[in-house]
Image (cartoon, coloured by chain):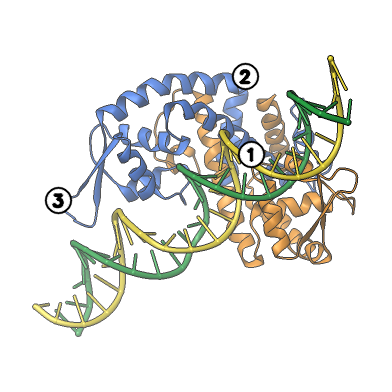
Chain colours: A blue, B orange, C green, D yellow
Amino acid sequence: MGKIEDAIQQKVFKDPYNKVVVNLLYTSSYLVTSQHAFFKPHGISPEQYNVLRILRGQNGVPTTVSSIQDRMLNKMSNASRLIEKLKQKGLVKREECPNDRRQVDVMITEDGLNLLNLVQQEVERANKQFINLELDEVNQLNDLLDKMRG
Amino acid sequence: MGKIEDAIQQKVFKDPYNKVVVNLLYTSSYLVTSQHAFFKPHGISPEQYNVLRILRGQNGVPTTVSSIQDRMLNKMSNASRLIEKLKQKGLVKREECPNDRRQVDVMITEDGLNLLNLVQQEVERANKQFINLELDEVNQLNDLLDKMRG
DNA sequence: CAACATTTGTTGTCTATACATTTATTACGG
DNA sequence: CCGTAATAAATGTATAGACAACAAATGTTG
């Protein structure tokens, strides 16, 4: 069984609320670890993959760094440096915004799009296999997560 | 509303399975960020707090580094360096294991226990307030998380 | 018991998170 | 306009996660 009590060898929790915090952190770490290994052969990290997805969603419209930051899974992450990494790999381009020279327009390149499309199908298949739940349970889980942050 | 679609400005997901991965990662990041801020005034990180909790659970019995690693929320974390940080703050002590000189016995100090007891009550109260769910929903969420990793 | 394998922990390197600070540019109020 | 505030991005620093490589000690086997 995959019970959290066994996974971290802790028998008792203060209450279900405190247990669910631990359970969430553990589950997330479990997901991220497997994602890391998954992306590694493609030369990108999960966070970089996420930025590429955000950029593709723009359908060619340039996006500013702060706009990317707002859409990232981790709001505290450093979009500026992630984009620099992606640029070094030729997966995005970055140019000064003509209207406002403080801002920087970021766009995904052809190479970026190709890598993303290649990897995405694998990711989506892996994500699905990874989650040992029926469809109605997944929907429940999504609803509970949305509500708990509410 | 706290729907994940709004939180990261993504309207469509491939399917509920892929959505729940994103939802989990986002929710976890949301939790960790607030925990960081919470622990900061006490001079420790969430991970260091977790190690202290593991050590207290031993009730004075020394624990090896690898045993701590096994019980950590993030199995890929570097227990060796976390323990070094805690030692520098005087919250744990570390000594060579007499039976097996490869191993290192780690114990929580009085200062470590005092800090942990002080912080824990605040943490547990905050965790509970943080989660906008009824008791039966929290139990459901725990069950779904346990099952999904199964 | 000597040679080799295994285990335990430390260390090195790269990436990312969590801020605080800095620099450049634009907006605004007198 | 000019000076100051506000904004966008880059940069600095500390901690942690994800490995790979290493050293020391112990197990194992001929």
The span from disc 1 to disc 2 (Cα, nearest Å) is 29 Å
Please give the residue where the numbered disc 1 appears in the rendered image.
B76
Nearest the viewer among B110 and B5 is B110
The span from disc 3 to disc 1 (Cα, nearest Å) is 44 Å
- Residue B67's place in the image compared with A76, above or below, is above
The location of residue B140, given as percent across then percent down, is 70, 33
Q: Can marks 3 and 1 be said to lie on one chain?
A: no
Q: Can you tell which mark lies on residue A146?
A: none
The amino acid on which the numbered mark 1 sits, given as a three-letter code, is Met
User: In what element is the residue under mark 2?
Assistant: loop
The amino acid on which the numbered mark 3 sits, given as a three-letter code, is Pro
Q: Nearer the viewer, mark 3 or mark 1?
A: 1
Q: Can marks 3 and 2 be said to lie on one chain?
A: yes
Going from N to C along the chain, the mark reached first, 3 or 2, is 3
Letter of the chain that mark 2 sits on in the rendering: A
User: In what element is the residue under mark 1?
Assistant: loop
Q: Is residue A107 left or right of residue A122?
A: left
Q: What's the residue at 19%, 50% (across, down)?
A: A96
Which image quadrant is residue A21 in? top right
Q: Nearer the viewer, mark 3 or mark 2?
A: 3
- Residue B96's place in the image compared with A55, above or below, is below
Please give the residue where the numbered disc 3 appears in the rendered image.
A98
